[in-house]
Image (tube, grey):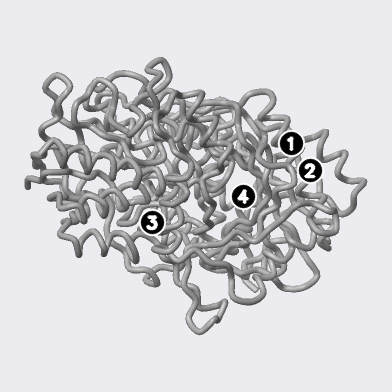
Amino acid sequence: MDAEVLVVGSGAGGATTATVLAEAGFDVLIVEEGQWVEQGSVLPFSLDQMEQQYRSGGVTVALGLPSIAYTEGRCAGGGTEINSGLYRRPPDDVLQKWAVDYEIAELDHDEVLTIATEVEQTINVTTVPGPASAPSEVLRRGAERLGWLNSEIPRWMKYANGDPQSGQRQSMTRTYLPRAVAAGARLATGCRIDALQMSGGNAHRATTTLSDGSRGTIRFRHVFVCGGAIQTPALLQRSRITGHIGRSLAVHPTVKLAARFADELNVPDDVPVHQVKEFAPDLSFGGSASQPGLVALALSDQWDTFGRAVTDWRRISVYYAAITSEGRGRVRAVRGLRDPIVTYGLTRRDRALLGSGLARLALLMLEAGADEVYPSFRGAPLVRKRSDLAAMRSRFSAAKASVMTVHLCSTVPMGEDTTKCGANSFGRVHGTTNVWVNDASLLPTAPGVNPQGTVMALAIRNARRFASSERSRG
Amino acid sequence: MAWDSRHLQLDGIVGPFADVLLAADLPLLPVDRRAEAVQFVQRRICVIPSFTRFGVTVIGLLYRGLLAAPGGAAVARFLSSKPLPVLGEYPRLIRSLGYAYIWERWPDTMPSGATQ
């Protein structure tokens, strides 16, 4: 297989990049390691979905004290197929700070917001037509009783006939990927890129392994690596590309709790749409997937005392407190190992913030009417009333908690400051002539909000810049 | 070709430990359900990233050695109930996978593992 432009990965970055370039007339080949899985063929947030659409069945971890569990999509459409679908615009203050701190040229806020508006139309960003689900109402109710800022976060979703139960996620397999293919792009699933073959700073060929184990190569003129914040730096490192690659992983670490209410409220196949932003950007609260298996998981750290609650899973929902972390992690491709080693270190401030976040979240649950709250850390006390919160705070330690994240970014930060940036202001990897990164890896820091809106807007900006400069070059 | 610890026979390492752990945690879980959950745990461990799988293999071998020793099962159960750094992450992982499977597959399972 040959292509003028090879796009590695088909998630929020890869699908948008491929669409822009194919519509601009480039010969585009998209390669995706995972398979195409039709929406509706697997139950959202189930183990079956994890098996089919998550990397390593969803069991991936950044090593550290504590280790942080994370998830990555590994399917056509990438993370957009499996996440909550909650959408946030790129925050203005964050864009401005990135432009200054990382010397990002021409990061025009108006341009980014104009692109964001296009994205919102394409993926149909909208609120729920009607009342939100009961677990979501818990967040709103608790926050309002405390006077805390909260709002419904819109999602990329279409609702048939205004029925809130009929939502169909407008992920990449429903939006940008079909558009890219209609414009002439080719999509190859079940194809892993092992490495890029480099001559000086020029990449000219990719070595591949198909899902049946057979090997091959793809020749190209330009390559856009859009495998996400873990796989993108790992591929660059396997390709012997050096520089600031994989050294500054940023995430939004989260801790969880389960809360039991008087009435049944569990919605196994969906997540709440409300978030509480009173303490943002440092701290945010939201709702998690609450399949009964995930309820059991949330209780498992203190099974002796919390386990009895599992039979009440219909009255239980799981919630999280997410922080904007000052810690950083690394992604290291190790010669001879198929998968990279991922590490992450929380700072002292991060650990304290996780503890205070979990306590505030527990308070919010009590205010919302929870009978019992089960914090997810070893040695956690049962929380039934406000006076239990002090004991919870005193017993909490991040090292005992089940810390996880779904937002991974910043492993190839964009900007002209080569002491801390792996790619230039438009995603071209420093020291290369035709290797581009166009995914969450480029975000210089974790933005403090759901990042995929920012990823899509920046990916389109960069792809357009590439297209115009290549065309003007003739 | 990249080394891949999937080449190791992990079933014999992870399976017996998962079985002991789930039997101790959920004593009334029917044997056929426990066997199904153990199979699930084994399948998942076989696809986790290579470095983590290597760590799981090493710790799993330690536990397997323990299970083979006289009275070792009791010691293994004791250790798996303690929040030990590094060593404790192994039973925590096995337990997480097992519980997630059991309650997703049979949501009305009692905390003891008994069926309603």
The residue where tag 1 is placed is A355
Q: Position of residue A422 (x, y in %)?
A: 35, 24
Residue B65 visible, this orientation: no
**Chain under numbered label 3:** A
Q: Are marks 2 and 1 in contact (CB under 8 Å)?
A: yes
User: Mark 2 sits on what residue?
Assistant: A359
- Disc 2 + disc 3, Cβ < 8 Å: no
Which residue type carries mark 4? Ala
Viewer-nearest of discs 1 and 4: 1
Mark 4 lies on a secondary structure that is helix
- Side of A186 relative to B5 (left or right): left
Residue B2 figure quarter: top left
Q: Is residue A172 visible?
A: yes
* Vertical arrangement, residue A405 with respect to residue B113, above or below: above
Q: Which residue is at a point 63% across and 24% down the rendered structure image?
A: A347
Residue for point 80% across, 70% down: A262
- The Cα–Cα distance between marks 2 and 4, rounded to whole angstroms, is 32 Å
Using the numbered discs, state the Cα–Cα distance from disc 2 to disc 3 in whole angstroms: 33 Å
Distance (Cα) linking label 2 and label 1: 6 Å
User: How far apart, in angstroms, are the residues tagged by discs 4 and 3?
Assistant: 27 Å
Image position, residue A172 (x, y; %): 35, 59
| Chain identifier of the residue bearing label 1 in the image | A
- Residue mark closest to the camera, 3 vs 1: 1
Name the foreground residue: A262 vs A5. Answer: A5
Looking at the rendered structure, the kind of residue marked 3 is Glu
Whether labels 2 and 3 share one chain: yes
Q: Earlier in the sequence, mark 3 or mark 1?
A: 3
